[in-house]
Amino acid sequence: MMNNSLVMYDEDYRKLLAIIQRLVQDATAKGVFLVDTNGQMVADAGEMEGIDTTSLASLTAGNIAASSGLAKIIGEEEFPTHFHQGQRDNLFITLVANRIILVVVFDERSSLGLVRLRVKKAGVQVAQIFEEIRKKAEQEQASGGGSPFSEITDDDIDNLFSE
Amino acid sequence: MSFINYSAREINCKIVYYGPGLCGKTTNLQFIYNRTNPEVKGKMISLATETERTLFFDFLPLALGEIRGFKTRFHLYTVPGQVFYDASRKLILKGVDGVVFVADSQVERMEANMESLDNLRVNLAEQGYDLDKIPFVMQYNKRDVPNAAPLDELRKLLNPTDSIPDFEACATKGTGVFETLKSSAKMILKDLRSMSR
């Protein structure tokens, strides 16, 4: 089934948040973001308050999708890690389990080596949580329930568009 | 593919505006951006060339309100319409929940419309989607130009079985823009409901 949703429950979200909060500390990062490959922001942690996370998510996913296309053109399966060096801040981007993108923003307080090392460990943990989410979704699909959409009416939808 | 987040109580969906080059996809998004309240919209991103042709995509996040305590957010994307940007178009269709096809009403663009519609079907199929099964809305844009083809002719070519909701539009003035968007968003929500039952 192609169009099944990514459903994230509070419990999974808290686990992911704990992992990226720890990564912020361990990697001495300014911020860590988890982005779905389709461009949705899943979770964020760190000191980057006020940043436009929606745009960040969309552009990160576009970036990863474009690099993945490039990889295939030259016969590579994927470019799973990306590093962008700025004047003050740097970006380290990793594709985890072909499904989720881990973005780390860091400055001179940290280093590429440290970030790379810490991301490796956190990436494995994130992949595990997403595997659990995938299994849960499969079970729910089999039992035929769980989505908040099953209860909504035509009126609910129409009301959304009433002027 | 929608993203339902119980923790933030949010539902996120993706709408892609497709169509031939210069048909008005970006203009649709610009009109929506200009006419929505600041609290409803996020920043609009346009990855365009120096001549303002879409290079990769335009992106506009919109919050439409709440359904049963869940905030509904729609992420609107356009694809680059020019034929040679096909690799980029494929990428943007990833995870799509609904498609709006913006057709150019000008008689001389009929072939480009048909070609783009075929291209949409092929590119969706590559991602495992069937155009006949996903929420799909047709917009006949540029109805105000003097060389616009008659509506019947457009329908015969682009919506022959009359099975797709279709709208006449003039995106520069905004006519039909919100009607198209609402129709697409409603179809997506109904589709999500039917899949969850």
Image (cartoon, helix red, strand yellow):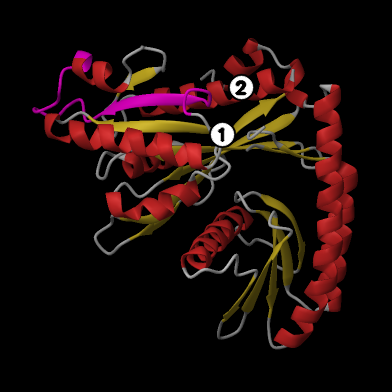
What is the chain identity of the residue bearing mark 1?
A: B
Q: Secondary structure at mark 1?
A: loop
Label 2 crowd (10 A; few <14 / some 14-19 / many >=20): some
Residue B76 visible, this angle? yes
Residue receiving disc 2 = B191
**Residue A132 in picture, x, y percent from top left:** 87, 47
Name which residue type carries label 2. Answer: Asp
Which labelled disc corresponds to residue B2? none
Quadrant in the picture for residue B87: bottom left
**Residue B80 in picture, x, y percent from top left:** 35, 50
Q: Residue furthest left?
A: B146
Residue A134, compared with residue B64, is above or below; it is below
Residue A146 visible, this angle? no
**Which comes sooner in the sequence, label 1 or label 2?**
1
Residue A2, compared with residue B59, is above or below; it is above
Give the magenta-colored segment's residue range.
B131-152
Q: Secondary structure at mark 2?
A: helix
Residue B118 belongs to the span the image colors magenta = no
Residue B149 belongs to the span the image colors magenta = yes
Which labelled disc corresponds to residue B97? 1
Name which residue type carries label 1. Answer: Asp
Quadrant in the picture for residue B108: top left
> Residue at the location (46% across, 25% down)?
B136
